[in-house]
Every structure is written in C-alpha cells, then in structure tokens.
Image: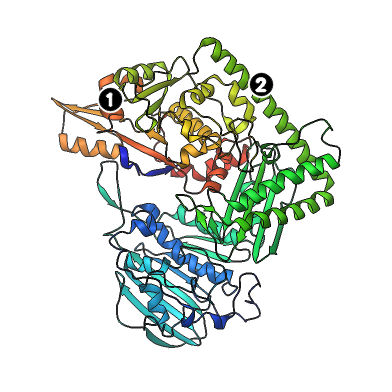
Amino acid sequence: MPNKQDSSAGTSIVTEDNSEKEEKENKPSTATGTDAADYSADTISVLEGLEAVRKRPGMYIGSTGPRGLHHLVWEIVDNSVDEALAGFCKVIDVTINEDNSVTVQDDGRGIPTGIVEKTGKSGVETVFTVLHAGAKFGGGGYKVSGGLHGVGASVVNALSERLEAEIHRDGQAYKQAYNRGEPDGGLQTLGPSDRRGTKVTFWPDDQIFHDVNEDNELVKIVMDWDVVITRLREMAFLNKGLKITVTDKRGENLHQEFHYEGGIASYVEYINDTRDVLHKPPIYFEQEQNNVVVECAMQWTETFTESIYTFVNNIKTGDGGTHLTGFRNALTRIINDYARKQNLIKENDANFTGEDVREGLTAIISVKVSEPQFEGQTKERLGNREVQGITQSVVSERLADWLELNPNPAKKIIQKALQARLAREAAQNAKKAIRRQSALENSSLPGKLSDCSDRDPSNCEIYLVEGDSAGGSAKTGRNRHFQAILPLRGKILNVERVQPGRIYENTEIQAMIQALGLVVKEDDEEGGKTAGLLRPNAENLDLSKLRYHKIIIMTDADVDGSHIRTLLLTFFFRYARPLVNNGYVYIAQPPLFKVTKGKRVEYCYNEHKLEAVLAEMGEKAEIQRFKGLGEMQAEQLWDTTMNPETRTLRQVTVADASEADHVVDLLMGEAVQPRKDFIMNHAHEVQHLDV
C-alpha cells in the first residue's frame, strides 16, 4: 500500500492426517541427513532470551507491515523444510484459516519433548520461548538448515496473540498453547498416537502488525494468497520430491498443491514456460564435494534476458556471492574452450565475454553448506570462499561433459553467444557515436531535461512525465532546488522484445540513460572488464554515478498512461534492476477527482474516497475528473502530487525476482497465446478500467 512520501510501502511491478512413513522411505542423504535419534532435547542449544522481540520486532523480521507478517509463515515453514532437508519430512500442509490464523503441519519427527538441561523446560517450550534455541545450533540436530538460524519459532510465538503447537512423536501426542509468547500451562500429553510430525497454528498479533492506507490511517493487514503460494511454490521447487499443499479457507476456499520430482530443473522449465528454448530438457546435475552439495539446472532460450537465481540451504541469495562467481567463471571458460575446440570461434577472434555466453540463459544454482557465511547489508550474499572453487569445479566438469555428449544443442548455444557478441559490438559502436555527438554539442545531458540546482543525489528527484503538456505544468509547479523534470514524447521501446543494443538507438531511452546517470561498472565480478553496456538482468550499475535517488514515474490515469508506465517499469526491471532493488523507483499518485463546494476543495485519489467526501459535503458539490496531468494547473500539481509534505508515492519493489521475471516475460514478451490466456483468466478481477 502507498504511504506518504518518505514511508512509501512497496508495490510489485493442505490435509491433516499424515501417517508415519517407514524409516527406509525417509532415509536421509549423506550430505544433509542425521539419524532420527540425533534430533532430541539434548541437541537443542540456547543462546539468549526472548525479551526484546515484542519491543523491537523489526530487528527480527524486518518490518511490522505485510512483509513482516508473511515472514512469520516462512519461519514456521522453514522449520518443516529443515526436516525435509534432513530426510524425515515428505509433506507440509499450510492453511490460512478463516480468522487469518495460519496452520503449518508436517510429517517430520516432531519437536523433541524431553527436558533441555540448560533451560529446565521441555524441548517444545524451549523452541517456542527461547530466542536462538534450536537444533540448528546443536551438534546433532541438522547438518544443513535454512531460516534465521533457529530464531524462527520463538519469534513467531512472541509476535502472535496466540500460538498452539501439537506434537506427534514416539507414539504419543502432545500439545502446548501460548499467549503473546508466554506458555498457557505446561506441555500436555494427549494420549497415544500412530502418527508423527508437528502442527503449529498461530494468530498474528494485531497490536503489532498493521499498515498505512492512502489516507495515512492505520489498517489491519492479512495474509496475501498470491504472496504465500509464490514463496511455497519456490520451496517445493528447491526441495525435489517434497509435497507442499496450501489452502485458504477465507471466502473461496482456494487450494494449491506443489510437488516437483524434477526439483530445480522443473523450476527452470516454469520460468521458461513462455520462452522459446534452444534445448530440452534443461541441463541438470547435483554433486557433493568436500561436504558441499552443488545442484544446478540451466537452459538457454531465444530471449536476450539473463535469468540466474541462487540459493544457499533454500535461502535466496539475491546479491549472489561465491557460488554465483564460481558458476559464472566455469560457464565462461567451458563455453569458450568448447567453441575453440570445435573451431566455432576463429583463431584470431577474442573469446566470448561472460555477458555473451549468459545471454538468454535461465539458471538456478542451489548449494547446501553446513555453516554459510552471509555478507552485505542485507545478508543476501554468500561469503564462504571455499564454495567458489567447489562450484567452479563441479560446473566445469559437468557442463563440459554435457557439451561433448550433446553436440547439436551445444552448437546452438555457441551460435547464440556469437549473435550476442555481434549485438554487443554494434551497441558499443552506437554508444560511441552518441558520445561523439554529445561531445560536439558540448553537453552530456538531454536538452529537454529541466534539471534541479542541488547536486547531492540523495536530495534530488526526477519526474519522468508524459508529453510536453504535463511537462510544462510540472516544470512550472516544481521546486527547482531539488526536483528535475524529463518529458517523454510518446511510448518508449518495449525492451522485452528487442536485442539489448537497440536501447542505445532509442531517443527516449537514451535521454533517460543520460539524465539519470546510468553508468555500468568497468569491472565484473570475475575480475574482467565489462562492455560498458546496460544488459538485461545485469547487476552492474554503478550507483555512485546516479544523479537522483528518487526516480518518479508520473503519467496520466488512463490506458495510454498505464501503458507508458508499464514500459518504463519493464525497462527499469530489465536493464536497471539495482534501481528497483535499492528503492529508487517510485510511481506518483495524482488525484483522480477534485470536489468543490463553496470555498472548500478536496482532492480524491480513488472512488472510495470520492464517495466519502460527497457524503460529507452533501448536495451541490461540484466534481471535476482529471483525465490527464495537463489539465491540472501548476499549483494544483504541486499541492497534490509533487509537494513532499502532501503527496503520496508508491515505491516500486520486487518481492520475488524469479516470479517477477516470469510475469514480465509473460506480459511484455513475444509469446501471444500465454498473454491471451492470462488476460482471459484474470479479466474478472478488474474492477475499474478507464478507457
């Protein structure tokens, strides 16, 4: 939901009776498993208390908005997935109940019920009431674990109005309830049970979780079905053979089941569902080396997009890390070696760059590491140095074998890289020509840019506006000290359907590149030199050269304006994704209506607000519908849309990059029929279409 200026929230471009399985069916792998007997109260170690969680929830779950609310689900599910990683869980059932509580049930070994020596409490009570308590820190619990290192269950309990845990273990059933983190009595023995597993139901605390609506009012937030199934689908992909069911008992009683025997190979096929691929099936391999398991799936497509997603112990590493570097090093070297061996690169020609060989590639790299080390501000970058060499070794060996055994698709991959190199060289020539022209004109900024006087990017913002009419009002109404205006004439190029070099031939995109200061880093992650070009899905923007830290898209509230906004978002997502990832892209929210009665004037941003204002003002109120920004006077535009004290902005964020990648390709790519199917399937959800 949108908030006022500096607190803008993000937008984005199950069964119960699981009988115990035979031990031989649940036999753990050598890489991740432990014996069932190893998961006991003695393996639960304790690091610190739970007092601070309710006081500072953001420290533990990131926020108390929608993202933090859903994080509670992920923490409980992660515990069940850890049982699957250890080889003891085959089914996880997740249910959103009618009262917005959530139930997560698995068929794992069940949380230990014995007494933990250090706490004097049962294993169940220790796990749910002591921070950093879990088998993830013990010597015998899990060799590999995801989640937040064991804080999950206790943090969920602390931030829930009520939580109930039901355990089936060692032929007995147990239950314990908690109120806002405090036990509601001790662990109860319910009686004999022929099942095993853990069932947790929690009611998020409304005193903690809330959001702000368009009128800056606190509102209750609830679980979002789409967010839940997107994340749980990904978990099923990452854990081959694991079955995850999801049920929503609110309203329509929705149900989804995710079960992929192909694992991450199926994930790659899912992402590439609307793309023309160069080979089938995806390349897939899994190999353990020095107690590190490397699992990889990859497939080249006819697109120009590089889509690579990396995970460590089921944790998404959005900033990559040593496993990604090892993968890229191996990929570039092996493709070049094979091309030269087959005489597909001329003797005097330079090798392919990493960008050349990755064009059109979709890949998932998932590694399992016993003690992962995360780096960076967001802790989404793997830092273990040994993983780079191991990943590089495994990928080199297995990819080289695949190319030798599959000469026909291998040749297509080399031809794809050759085309990418030609396009890169053409783009470099186009960029050089533009630089020469700019040098002759003695200015590197586009002439139609109305710049601001402040030179500190953190203070500056730029409005990308639709046409000269709106641009004129915006230029007149703005604060020239920190607000710049760049009018865009017509609709920009749909970058999803063209070769990367074409963006440098498009006048409007070139104006944006120059005005915003979109500069590519000279060095890539592998220590080589980049081509200095914006590439699809690349993370190589030099943000230190960015001229504005707020890039605000301001278009008319009609179909054409929505299309222009979509084209701009597609460009930012594909060619300047770090701008989105770092929170620099916003969408302005101009009012749709002006209501006047006497001297009183109210601006309404939606029909719900309009109805409320009309009910308050009574009869004889005059309504003006703004069809375009050009209709608004400069003073009105400032008061409603540009003044930081009174405006509403929506910050553009991406909750799940792979799902966003899939949707952008579906809506903006070449394939027509999948787009038609999507429109037909979702047309009934449209409540207001302004044509």
- Of the residues under marks 2 and 1, which one precedes in the sequence? 2
Seen at 37% across and 33% down, the residue is 458
User: Label 1's element?
Assistant: helix
Q: In front: 289, or 681?
A: 289
Q: Quadrant of the C terminus?
A: top left
Report the number of discs.
2
Seen at 50% across and 88% down, the residue is 171
Q: Is residue 153 visible?
A: yes
Q: Is residue 598 left or right of residue 440?
A: left
Point out residue 650 in the picture as x, y percentages from the top left corner. Answer: 37, 38
Point out residue 132 in the picture as x, y percentages from the top left corner. Answer: 41, 69
Q: Residue furthest left?
A: 598
Point out residue 150 in the picture as x, y percentages from the top left corner. Answer: 45, 68
Residue 580: which numbered mark, if any?
none
Q: How is the image coloured?
A: rainbow
- Above or below for 460 versus 182: above
Point out residue 146 in the picture as x, y percentages from the top left corner. Answer: 52, 63
Judge the density around disc 1: few (<14), some (14-19), many (≥20) Cα neighbours within 10 Å. Answer: many
Judge the density around disc 2: few (<14), some (14-19), many (≥20) Cα neighbours within 10 Å. Answer: some
Seen at 49% across and 79% down, the residue is 43
Residue 429: which numbered mark, if any?
2
Q: Amino acid at mark 2?
A: Asn
Q: Is residue 35 left or right of residue 543?
A: right
Q: Is residue 137 left or right of residue 423?
A: left
Q: Amino acid at mark 1?
A: Trp
**Residue at numbered disc 1:** 638
Q: Residue furthest top?
A: 440
